[in-house]
């Protein structure tokens, strides 16, 4: 399983008054991440009914390369810029089975 493609589903719920800040900071992550080694896709979505809810759907060639991504400066910059602006966050590491 170690060499299987890894799917990440990250759910970010912004505080209503911080939605535009969180959204702009999430968008900043897209271009540099798509250039990273191992990134198959890195797609950001916004919920049609709850505009405070964002979802990243990502695929990585290996878990190790995704972990390397999580240590990049643009991730740290996002975390700093959005400190206190996110109401809830969950991350799911998944494996495609069909």
Image (cartoon, helix red, strand yellow):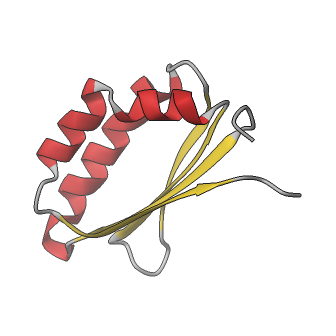
Q: 24 and 40: which one is in front?
A: 40
Residue 48: x %, y % from top left:
50, 74
Residue 47: x %, y % from top left:
48, 71
Quadrant in which the N terminus is drawn: top right
Q: 14 and 92: which one is in front?
A: 92
Residue pictured at 64% horizontal, 48% vertical:
7
Residue 58, by quadrant, is top right
Residue pictured at 36% horizontal, 42% vertical:
27
The residue at the far bottom in this view is 49
Residue 3, by quadrant, is top right
Q: 27 and 78: which one is in front?
A: 78
Residue 92: x %, y % from top left:
53, 60
The image shows residue 25, relative to residue 69, as above or below, that is: below
The image shows residue 34, relative to residue 22, as above or below, that is: above
On the rendered structure, is 46 left or right of 19? right
Residue pictured at 33% horizontal, 30% vertical:
71
Residue pictured at 67% horizontal, 30% vertical:
61
The residue at the far right in this view is 98
Quadrant in which the C terminus is drawn: bottom right
Residue 39: x %, y % from top left:
59, 29
Residue 78, by quadrant, is top left
On the rendered structure, is 61 left or right of 73? right
Task: Say how many tags the image has.
Answer: 0
The image shows residue 52, relative to residue 98, as above or below, that is: below
Q: 70 and 77: which one is in front?
A: 70
């Amino acid at each position: 399983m170690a060499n299987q493609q890894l799917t990440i589903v990250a759910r970010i719920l912004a505080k209503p008054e911080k939605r535009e800040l969180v959204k702009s900071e999430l968008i900043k992550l897209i271009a540099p991440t798509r250039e990273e080694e191992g990134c198959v896709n890195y797609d950001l979505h916004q919920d049609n009914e709850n505009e405070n809810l964002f979802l990243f759907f990502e695929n990585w060639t290996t878990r190790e390369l995704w972990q390397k991504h999580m240590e990049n400066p643009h991730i740290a910059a996002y975390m700093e810029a959005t400190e206190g602006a996110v109401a809830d966050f969950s991350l799911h590491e998944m494996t495609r089975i069909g």
